[in-house]
Amino acid sequence: MPKLELQGVIKRFGDRTVCDGINLTVDEGQMVCLIGASGSGKSTLLRCINLLEPIEDGAIFLDGEDISIPGLNPQSVRARIGIVFQSFNLFPHMTALENVMLAPRRVRGLFRAELQPEVEALFARFGLADRMHNYPDQLSGGQQQRVAIVRALAMQPEVMLFDEITSALDPQLVGEVLDVLLMLKKQGMTMVMATHEMGFAREAADKICFLDSGRIIEEGPPEAVFDHPSHQTTQAFLARALK
Amino acid sequence: MTRRERYEAHQRRRSLVIATISTVTVVAAIYFLVPLAPGWTKVQQSFFNGETLVKTFPKLLEAFRINVMIFAWSAPAIAVLGLLIALARDAKSPALFPLRIFGAAFTDVFRGVPVILTVYLIGFGIPGLGLPRPWNSPYIWGSLALILTYSAYVAEIFRSGIDSVHHSQRAAALSLGLSERQVMRDVVLPQAIRNVVPSQMNMLIALQKDVSLLSFIGPVEIFRQAGVFKSLLANFTPYVGAAIIFLIVTIPATRYADHLMARQMRERR
């Protein structure tokens, strides 16, 4: 059974169809990269999986369980699926540590003292041990994004979604964030990421999905998609992206 | 000195000279022209009488303590009620729909009626029900009138603060599994309140002045006390004394609010 499965997911904003019947399976421990032009529906798809956007039709399964039933309380699902955004979205009025502890305290019902060792270990693992007590505006973009990843991981999610998490970073900071993803992959985290980092996608992904106008028009292992794209749109996109 | 520094030094000297000449001219004009007005000696006698000022000032200051007192218990009540009204207006659950309607009606009514009218209606109306002492005190009902009016304005400011928090903050908090209530309490409100502190400071300053409206329903606060002196001494100087006392409090407060506002503008950039 796949860890995450999407069947015919349709998402509309008004009369604009952003996701037009998406089918996707993600196995446990797999890293799937969504590539495609801006506006092709990558970000919206991730937001739908996390139930931040309700879908019009189709279904989303987590461990075989339908999580897209209308009216289902989204909180318990969101706690199992972490998402990291392009613009970090750290809470500016809290230190890095407080940012990370908020959700486990409120949702998992743990006390600060219980959490402290676990959270400190996370900070240390991602090279942020000396940044725990800084506020977001005292951190570099790369550090903020790593804190955002730690914040999502502190909920011990089963799946992580990454929405172009390096797009807002200065080029020299991209590496430190991508390294974090490699670490997670090594630990067996199931991940879906929307990205424009073609080099990284090729190296790290188990599967590449190319989206165009809300549809996955090509998917497969990186070598197949990057070296022998079968679809003309994919060829044109890759020719531009890899130039 | 570089060419540019020489030029800027020259410009600074020039600005300073022009500002000095212009200020001296205006002050001199006021100083020499105003006393030429036919009624000046009379005005000076009845509004700027040093002797009366010295005599009444301590009593005025004492009466001002009542203003401070009413302010001190009204302000926290306004902050709490204003926040509750703001939250009520944003309530989403259908069960809370009546609360939403109430919040909207509340802000419409109390922002739409002049403060003095609310003070009159509540300050005279409710004790008129024949309540026993101390429940017929104008301090209670006058303060309530101020609290209701100011809560309506303060609620709207809180609401604008809530709107000013970017929706991506809500999305981030929801994505972690927090409930709507937790998102509001832990993520949105703390930022919203911080964003509106300067605006709320201005409301506090306005409130400090409007406490004087309670004089119309009884309490002998500073404005009423000045009126008493005016009748007693047939001289308006006590009003000027009262104005001076207000300014001693409000000018630093206004400056401080402006400072907060300016700092916030810098941080936003």
Image (cartoon, coloured by chain):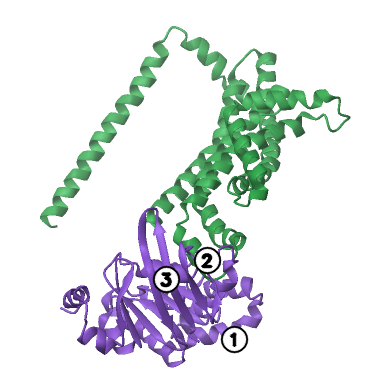
Q: What is the number of callouts on the image?
A: 3
- Residue that appears at 52% across and 10% down: B42
Check disc 2 and report the residue beneath it: B173
Q: In the picture, residue A6 is in which quadrant?
A: bottom left
Instruction: Return the residue at label 3.
Output: A8
Q: Amino acid at mark 1?
A: Pro
Mark 1 / mark 3, whichever is N-terminal: 3
Answer yes or no: do the residues labelled 2 and 1 have beta carbons within 8 Å?
no
Say what amino acid the circle numbered 2 marks.
Ala
- Res A100 visible: yes
Q: Position of residue B168 (x, y in %)?
A: 45, 61
Chain identifier for the purple-coloured part of the image? A
Within 10 Å of the Cα at label 2, are there few (<14), some (14-19), or many (20+) other Cα atoms?
many
Tell me how far mark 1 sits from mark 3, CA to CA: 42 Å
Foreground residue among A145 and B266: A145
Residue B26 position in % (x across, y down): 33, 25
| Mark 1: secondary structure | helix
Chain of the residue under the numbered disc 1 shown in the image: A
Element on which disc 3 rests: strand
